[in-house]
Image (cartoon, rainbow, N blue to C red):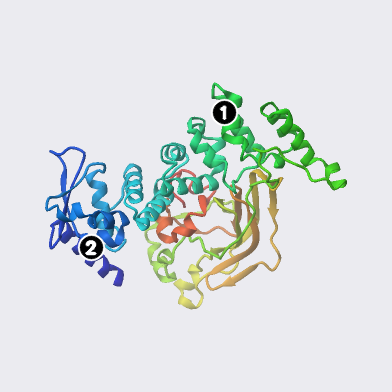
Amino acid sequence: MAGLNLMTVASKKLKALQEGLLTDVVFLVGENDETAMKIPAFKIELIVSSKYFANLFNNNLTLKCDENVRLKNIEPQVFLFIVEFTHLSGRLVSDVDSLGTCLKLACAAEEFMIEDLAALCSKFLENKFLSVENVWAVLSEYHTVKSIASPCLQFLCLETRECLLKEESFLGASEEAVKLFVTLEKMNISESELLEACLGYASNKEDKRDAFRRCFLRDLRTLALDSASLIKLAPFLTPAEKISIVSCMSPLTKMIGAAPLLSPGLCPISEGRSEKIVIVGEQTLTLIPDCHILSPIEIYLQMENIANYIFGPDVHDTFVLTLLPRRSIKILGVEIINGLNFHDVAFGGGESVTRKTLQFEFIESSVTSPREFDGLRVHQEVKQDANSVTESGGCTLVKLSTLVPAGAIFVFKARLKENTFLRKLCFYDDDLKRFNEKATMNVFSRVNNGAFFAFQDNEDGIA
């Protein structure tokens, strides 16, 4: 309720601002004098929020000027967001609804030195607007704007494989953008894969060798490359650089205790930047929220509308849960809702016998990675411990302790022990975002849950 009241107050304040109620300064905003928009504001709010405006309004020339303050290099719609943000104490009620608007607002926030607004724009980019298809274009154009470059680099850190190896827009990225990219401490690809991508980028340039050395050589971790990759790198190195790399990597150098000297201009780091698994905190991904879990009586009464239910065929029904995490996670378990015993409900069992126990049978679970992880390609079958299934109310918990590297695929399969009616519940990405916290949803690139046979035609939703 408090949040609702706050929004009401914010909306009222925004309306009063737009009407110019008690405002003490007017900005004339827009490139063209004839079409420029008059935007009212409060000096004190702008002064305390921005060093730019503090300097502007403390300037003697500005203080003596009774006319409107002229701003030519910003669009009126963008400046309206700035005035709203300062007026509402660091909040926005209006929706930043496009990538272009967000980028312009981030640039304006940095120009006017409003750090909180720049940080908000970074969150918008990270959570709403950046994608595999546009991240290189955005970074190429705005690499000097910190609030834009930082979320782009964070996105590339988490989605390196998709953005680098599968997206052709990387080949058209600016040199400034790729130079920033190769400074990243962590990526979800190996250094050898990074070298392949860098060679591909340089091959599109007329000065292939010079372009590679200019863009990549300083930050490429040559000491973390395998012998096959070093052979590919050799044509881009000078004789002195080749000798220094061999000297640093040779076991003989360590045996005689000599201090190897790496040529200036080469990266001295010998560790790869492939992500290490670090698990922080514990979160729950909810596929079926409490609001959709009906009481036994409600479900029994709904059985009259048989269209909402499917009765399994003679074969047992197999359900599959597939997760593709953006970052490394540890899966502690999967909780499955048990089916109802309709016979007990119909004949007076009521709430005392609500759901069948151990209705599901664990089949298998696996983790498969399409990339090398710490030098190994991951594929493991997850075995179920005999004591790993526990009952908790109307649910069965299958306990697991499974590490899933970023970009790997986790598959969990369970089968009904007997045929039964299945209630159809279809959810979409927007629904999952409402059920779960943003931090939880940002962990996953893909979540898919359903029966093999029942919902094969449901490609868009999650059954």
Q: Which mark is residue 220?
A: none
Q: Where is residue 35 in the image (x, y as percent from the top left)?
A: 14, 39
Q: What residue type is labelled 2?
A: Ile
Nearest the camera: 257 or 166?
Answer: 257
Q: Earlier in the sequence, mark 1 or mark 2?
A: 2
Instruction: Say which residue label 2 marks.
Output: 44
> Up-down: is 26 above or below 352?
above
Q: Which amino acid does label 1 sit on?
A: Ala
Residue 94 visible in the displayed image: no
Nearest the camera: 158 or 303?
Answer: 158
Residue 53 visible in the displayed image: yes
Is disc 2 placed on a helix, strand or loop? helix
Instruction: Please identify the quadrant where the N terminus is shown.
Output: bottom left
Q: Quick one: label 2, few (<14), some, or many (20+) residues within 10 Å?
A: some
Q: Where is residue 460 in the image (x, y as percent from the top left)?
A: 43, 45
Q: Is residue 180 left or right of residue 390?
A: left
Q: Quick one: label 1, few (<14), some, or many (20+) residues within 10 Å?
A: many
Q: Which residue lies furthest to the front in this view?
A: 60
Is disc 1 placed on a helix, strand or loop? helix
Q: Where is residue 258 in the image (x, y as percent from the top left)?
A: 83, 45
Residue at 70% x, 42% y: name it: 224
Residue at 37% x, 53% y: name it: 118
Nearest the camera: 124 or 359?
Answer: 124
Q: Position of residue 145 (x, y in %)?
A: 41, 45
Disc 1/disc 2 C-alpha distance (Å): 51 Å
> Up-down: is 420 above or below 160?
below
Q: Which residue lies furthest to the right in this view?
A: 256
Q: In which quarter of the image is residue 84?
A: bottom left
Instruction: Say which residue label 1 marks.
Output: 211
